[in-house]
Amino acid sequence: MPEKPIVLATGNPGKLREIAQVLAGLPVDIVGLNELAAIPEPEETGDTFARNARDKALYYAQATGQWCLADDSGLEVDALGGEPGVRSARYSSDTVAPGAGRSIVDLANNTKLLAALEDVPDHLRTARFVCCLALADRSGVLIETSGTFEGLIARGAAGDNGFGYDPLFYVPDCNCTAAQLPPEEKNRISHRGQAVKRFVELLADHLARKS
Ligand code: ITT
């Protein structure tokens, strides 16, 4: 059976790496956006992760004519009423120049988060990562899954793995931050790892029904 091409519709190399790792071995041909002619990034306007994942998947499916898998994810901090939430990637957009590189934006986001939580005691620094995935073709959404990952916001950064808020995201069961976890371990327990695993099960059913 020929492998089904699936475009991983993300401009975030951290997400791409993590999703591709779990999808390796499936009868699908994973295509990165960098392998296609440039497509302008869509604007994110939804107020839920699920809505944004669907919108991104549909946008890229229309643009490419292929099956497209999109991820919308972010960090919900309880002491901040769920912020930065769907605005996680652009939390520090008030201080960072438009077009700044991802490492600069990640650093600015983390610095802003630490400042916002400066006076919040340890036991109230609870937070979770949320990931929603959507697979779409031109005609609509085919599969949706989600996952969450509970932790605490540390008082300083630690670790070089992962991306985004990982250096601040302390995982009590592992006694380290998400950025200190080996990539396979983060994928085993993370919001994205959980969402991709469920996605793999639903994709297998979907492909079996079509064959
Ligand atoms: P695409 O829309 O191109 O996929 P993006 O980075 O703009 O890339 P989002 O709008 O979904 O994607 O924002 C997700 C942000 O949430 C991401 O940039 C990180 O700041 C944060 N985030 C999500 N998952 C994370 C993880 O596993 N570890 C650390 N930070 C994460």
Image (cartoon, rainbow, N blue to C red):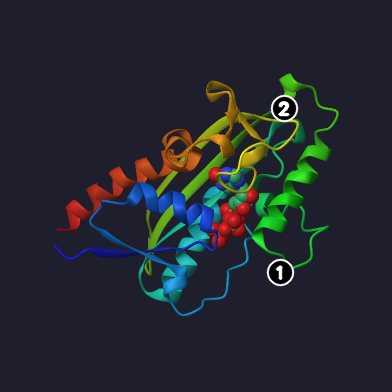
Q: Quadrant of residue 179?
A: top right
Residue 77 horizontal side relative to residue 151, left or right = right
- Is the N terminus in the top left, top right, bottom left or bottom right quadrant? bottom left
Q: Residue at x 65, y 59 (%)?
A: 102
Image vertical order of residue 88 relative to residue 190, above or below: below
Residue type pointed to by label 1: Gly
Residue placed under numbered mark 1 in the picture: 99
Residue type pointed to by label 2: Arg
Q: Position of residue 192 (x, y in %)?
A: 47, 43
**Residue nearest the viewer, comparing 173 with 180:** 180
Q: CA distance from mark 2 to mark 1?
A: 31 Å
- Identify the element where label 2 is drawn: loop
Labelled disc at residue 84: none
Residue 17 horizontal side relative to residue 180, left or right = left
Outermost residue, right side: 119
Labelled disc at residue 125: 2
CB under 8 Å between discs 2 and 1: no
Q: Between label 2 and label 1, give the one nearer the viewer.
A: 1
Q: Is mark 1 within 8 Å of ligand 1?
A: no
Residue 34 horizontal side relative to residue 21, left or right = right
Image vertical order of residue 23 relative to residue 82, above or below: below
